Amino acid sequence: MTFFNELKASLEQAVNISQGALDGVNVTRFEVSDVKAIRAQLNVTQAEFANALGTSVDTVKSWEAKRRNPTGLAAKVLAAIKDNPQLYAELASH
């Protein structure tokens, strides 16, 4: 299964859980990413980073200031980008 298919399946499952069609039985925790370092490595603005991740600039700012921690799918995507920076280019192009 490709990474994007895995993301799609995860999002579909999240929708089903939020609509009560499934029970949310699995909780996965990821190491908190240093979002600012990841973004700096990519040499992109907060706005560009937020757009590629499908989130708001305020969320990225909160992650970077460590007021909030990325969780769930966002944490998984950030970990994948950290390990494979080329993944960011793929996300940004969609």
Image: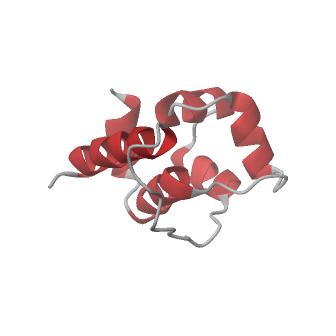
Asked if residue 70 lies left or right of residue 17, the reply is: right
**Residue sitting farthest toward the left:** 1
- Of residues 22 and 74, the one nearer the viewer is 22
- Of residues 44 and 29, the one nearer the viewer is 29
Residue 69, percent from left and from top: 71, 57
**Residue 66: which quarter of the image?**
bottom right
Q: Residue at x 53, y 56 (%)?
A: 72
Residue 78, percent from left and from top: 51, 55
From the image, which quarter does the N terminus lie in?
bottom left
**Residue 83: which quarter of the image?**
bottom left
Q: Is residue 27 above or below residue 37?
A: below
Residue 92, percent from left and from top: 41, 31
Q: Which color scheme did the rendering employ for the protein?
A: secondary structure
Q: Is residue 47 above or below residue 82?
A: above
Q: Is residue 32 above or below residue 89?
A: below
Asked if residue 64 lies left or right of residue 85, the reply is: right
From the image, which quarter does the C terminus lie in?
top left
Asked if residue 24 lies left or right of residue 31, the reply is: left
Q: Residue at x 48, y 63 (%)?
A: 79
